[in-house]
Image (cartoon, rainbow, N blue to C red):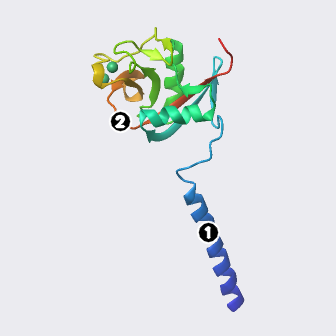
Amino acid sequence: MVLLSVIVYLVLNGIATTTKIKGNFHCTKPPKECTDCVEWNGSLYNFINTTQSYENSSMICQHKSNDTHLVYIESKEENEFVTRMLATFGSRVTPWIGLSDGKSEGNWTWGNHRAEYFNWDHGEPNGERGENNVIINLVHDGKWYDVPPGWHCPTVCEKKLHAR
Ligand SMILES: [Ca+2]
Ligand SMILES: [Ca+2]
């Protein structure tokens, strides 16, 4: 009986220790390049479903590799693909995309590239100098919204597999 108690104690203690270690890693998963990536048209896409400031979301992508960035959505087809990919994570996700007019109001860019394709929702963009970063909104069918600083949203990273 004593032996059994010792075994039970060790097993429970072991489980408790394991759980504690897992708990410690809950918010700081080790960065792995493109775990759970989806490939489409020469790029890898990666959805990270934790809400972050725009700056942190950008950094999360950049830390994966120096050619990874918040997703650049440069065509209707790409917007449809990203919307479909995000839909597998739920119908209400609203992640950051890499579009910004923070450097020059009204001049929307993907990194250093001027944006040509847009999928703004009706009435957007409407934030002028108060809204310089953009989310894609699955609640509204993958339409885009400029939003104010201080919002915390999930992340979609993109890594191009072939230089253009
Ligand atoms: Ca703006
Ligand atoms: Ca807006």
Q: Nearer the viewer, residue 64 or 3?
A: 64
Residue type at tag 1:
Thr
From the image, tell me which residue sits under label 2.
151
Above or below, 35 against 117 in this view is below
* In the displayed structure image, the side of residue 112 where residue 127 appears, left or right: left
Q: Which residue is mark 1?
A: 17
Which quadrant contains ligand 2?
Answer: top left
The residue sitting at the front extreme is 103
The local secondary structure at tag 1 comes to helix
Proximity of marks 2 and 1: CB atoms separated by less than 8 Å = no
In the rendered image, the quadrant that contains the C terminus is top right
Q: Who comes first in sequence, dot 2 or dot 1?
A: 1
* Percent of width and height locating residue 116: 46, 8
Q: Quadrant of residue 60?
A: top right
At 37% across and 25% down in the image, what residue appears? 140
Mark 2: few/some/many CA within 10 Å (<14, 14-19, 20+): few
* Quarter containing the N terminus: bottom right
Which image quadrant is residue 132 in?
top left
Query: Farthest bottom residue?
Result: 2
On the rendered structure, is 78 left or right of 4? left
Quarter location, residue 31: top right
Question: Quick check: 141 above or below 89?
Answer: above
User: Left or right: where does residue 138 sit relative to residue 61?
Assistant: left
Q: Residue at x 37, y 16 (%)?
A: 120
